[in-house]
Image (cartoon, rainbow, N blue to C red):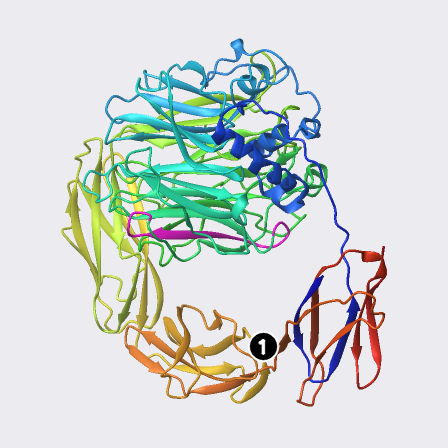
Amino acid sequence: MSTQFIKDISARRRWRMAGLLALILLAALIVLLNAPGIQAGDPQQAATKAELMSECRLLDDAQARNLMSGMFETKLLLACGRSGELGQVQNPASPDTLLLGPDVLVNDPTTDSGSSRTQSETSLAINQNNGTICSGYNDSYHGVTQGQGYTGFSSSTDGGASFTDHGPIGAVSFGDPSVIWRKSDGKFYIATIHSSGMGLWRSDTDCATFTFVGNPHIGSGDDKELLAVDNNPASPYYGRIYMAWTDFNAGARIFVTYSDNTTTWSTPVAVSAVGVDVQGAWPTVAPNGDVYVAWVRWNPYSTGPIDIEVVRSTNGGTSFTQVANPLTGGINPREAAATASCGRPALKGNIRYLPSPQIAVSPNGDLHVVYVYDPDGLNVGDVINTYYRRSTDSGATWGPEIQLNDDGTLTDQFFPTVSVGPSGRVVATWYDRRLDVANNTLFDYYMRVSSDGGSTWQASERVSDVSSPVVLDPNLATCYHGDYDQQAQDATGAYIQWSDDRTVVLSDPNVWFDAKTFASDFTLDVSPASLEVCVPANAVFNVTVGQVLGFTDPVTLSASGQPNPPNSATFNPGVVVPPGGSTLTIGTTGAAPGSYMIDVVGVAPTSTHTTTVQLNLFDAVATVNLVSPPNGAIDVPLQPTLTWNGTGNSYFVEVATDAAFTNVIDSAIVNGTSYMVGINLSGNVTYYWRVTADSACGNSTSPVWHFTTLDLQCSSPNLAIPDNNPAGVTNDLVIANGGTIDDLNVSVEMTHSWVGDVVFTLQHVDTGTTVTFYDRPG
C-alpha cells in the first residue's frame, strides 16, 4: 500500500506529520441505456458507448453539469438512463391571448405532435450566389416524438418572406446547430452535437436536404460546437472550415480544429488555459485569414466575476495567442429566485443562462464583440444588459464600451448577437423585456444598427411583433430555453431569427424570422480612433466616406471638440462624393495638454453621421515614480501587484532577478499605473523591477527598486504504510529559519485497503501542539 502527501507549507518552525492511511475500494455498476442514434453493432459507436459510461459521472459533478449546454446535458441524461431528471422546473401556463403576429415562421408547428414541440437556439447563413437563406435549430419534436434527432432545418428562396420546414437532419444529431455557407464550393454545412461527439452535414441541394459527412471530433465530452469558414478568395486559407467547442473529457477546455476538405480534420488545439472555468466559444475569420475565438471565463464558476477572452491565430488555426479582453471582472448575471429553482445561474422565468459572447470581423479587419453582465451588483437594480466593443488593432486594444439596450429600465436584455455586412455595417440583436416593466418576464426581440462600423449607433428597434411568455419543455434539460441565436447580413439588409413562445398551435417555442432592409447611405470612418501628439505638432486623421447601395450624394465634413483655437481643424477636401476620402489636420500650437474628444460629422442631403475620435496632447517627456512594494520590502507575496505614479500614456514594466536586467522574467505594457506580476515568483528570492513611462513627447525610466519574496517551504513525501505497525509512519519537515508561521496548507492523497484503522495527525514538535485531521472514520 502507498500514501502520497502533497503539501504547500509556508512556515518557519518544525512540524511532524503522522498518520495511518486507508482506502475503501468502491465498485460501481453503470448501466448505459441506448439513446436515440446510438446503435449496436457499430465499432465506432461501441467505443463511444464505453467512453460515455465514464462521462455519465459528469452528471454528478455539479460544476461540470452546470457548464453544459442544455442539449449536451439532455444527450447525457438520455444516454445514461436518467431521463427522469429532464424538465424538473416548469412555468405556469401562458395566456391564450398571445396570437400569431406578422413575423415569419421558420419551422412549421402544424406538423408537430406529442408533448415536446420546442424549436429554439437558431443559426443561419446566406448563399451569396442566389440569396437562399438556410436555418438550423434545435427541434425536440424530431428527437422526443419521432426519434429522428434533435436538429431541424428550413430554407427560404424568397428573401425570408416564407420558409419551408425540411424536417430532421438525422437521428444521430443532438442539437446545438451551427450553419455556414462555404463560398469555395457553394454549399451549406451544418454542425451539431453528435451521438459520437460532433457531426458535420453538407447540403448539395441548396439547403433542401443534408448528407452526413463525418465527425470532426469523436468524444462523448464534446459540447457546443460552432463553425466559421474562410470565404475570402484572397486569403491563404480560402475555403478552410474551423470548429471551436468545449471538451469536457479534457478539463472542459476550449479546442479548435480545422479542415480544408471537410473530411480530414487537424489535431485539435487547446486555446483556453488549464484549470479555468470557460464555455461558449464563438469563432470568426478575418479577411486576411486570421482566426479569432471568443468565450466567457468565470473566476471561478459560478459566483466569481466573468471575463470575455479572445484568442487569435495568424497561421490558419495551427496555433493561437491571447489578445486583450473586451471585458474583465464583470458580474455574472443571475436572478436569485430563478437561480435557486434551476440550480445554476438563471434569469427570471427560469431561463438557465450562459453569458457567452459573439465576435465578428469587418471587411477592414475591425473586431466587433457583444456580451452581457450585471451592471450594478448582484440582486440589486438591473440583472443583465447587453454591451458592445470594437477593436481596430486586431484585439490589442478595445474601444469604449457601448450599452446596446437603450431602454432606461431595469428589465432584462440577454443573448446578444452580432453581424457585419459587406459595407462594414454592424447589426446587434437581443432578447428584451423593456415592454414588461411591471413583471420583467414577457420578452421581445430587438435590434440596433451602426452604419459607421461601430462608432455610433442608431436607436434600438423592436423586431418581434408580439411579446412572448417563457415556456419550458419537460422533455429537455431543466430550465433550458436556448443558449444562442445567429443573424447575418448581405449588401441589402439584415436577416434576423430568434425563438419565442407565442401561441400558434400551442404555446411553445418556435423559430421566427424578420428582415431589415437598408436604404442607400454613406458610412463615415475616421482613423486612428485614438492619437497621441506632442505639442505643437499637428494631429492628422484619415477620413473614409464609404458607399452603401450606390449612394453618390456629396458629403460635407466638419469637426468640433478640438483644442483652441477652434478653427484649427481643416479637411482636405471638405466635401467628398462616396466612395472617397479626406485628411483631417488639427493644429495644436498653444493647446493645453490633455485628452480631447473630436466629433467628425458628415452631412448629406438625406442623412448625417458622426464619428468620435480621441486626441491626447502632451507637452513634456513622461515621468514615473515607483510606489509599492517599497524599495527593499521583504515577505512580498509570490504574485505581487506593482504600483507607481506617472504621466505616461502607457508603461513598460519589467521584473528581473538582477539589477542589470540581464535576466528579465516578466514584462508587460499597460495603460494604467499598476500591474500584477504575470507569473508565480520563487520564495525567499530578491527581485528587481522598473517602469518606463511613454508618451508622444518621449519616455523616461524609473530608478530600479527591489523586493524579497516570502519564504516558501514545500515537501511532497511518498510514504508506504507497513502492515501491523501501530506506531504508523511519520515525515518531518524542518524549517531552519526563525520567525512566525504565516500559512500552512496540507493536502493528502492516500491508497489503503481499510479506512477504519486510519488516524492522520499534524504535530508541531517544539510545542507538542497536535491537530487530528481524521480518526478512524470507517
Q: Is residue 16 left or right of residue 142?
A: right
Q: Does residue 478 appear in this view? A: yes
Q: Is residue 557 above or below residue 220?
A: below
Specify start and end residues of the magenta stretch as a single range. Answer: 301-317
Residue extending farthest to the front is 724
Q: Does residue 176 appear in this view? A: no
| Residue 412 location, quadrant | top right
Q: Residue at x 31, y 70 (%)?
A: 617
How packed mark 1 is, by other alpha carbons closer than 10 Å (few <14, some 14-19, many 20 or more), is some
Amino acid type assigned to the residue bearing label 1 in the image: Pro
Q: For numbered disc 1, what is the local secondary structure?
A: loop
Magenta run includes residue 14: no
| Residue nearer the viewer, 204 or 178 | 204
Instruction: Say which residue label 1 marks.
Output: 637
Q: Is residue 518 above or below residue 537?
A: above
Image spot of residue 236 (x, y percent): 21, 45
Magenta run includes residue 303: yes
Image spot of residue 657 (x, y percent): 44, 83
Q: Residue at x 33, y 50 (%)?
A: 318
| Residue nearer the viewer, 193 or 654 | 193
| Residue 746 location, quadrant | bottom right
| Residue 361 location, quadrant | top left
Q: Is residue 636 left or right of residue 218?
A: right
Residue extending farthest to the top is 110
Name the quarter where the C terminus is drawn: bottom right
Name the quarter where the N terminus is drawn: bottom right
Image spot of residue 399 (x, y percent): 38, 55
Total marks drawn?
1
Image spot of residue 142 (x, y percent): 53, 17
| Residue nearer the viewer, 315 or 194 | 194
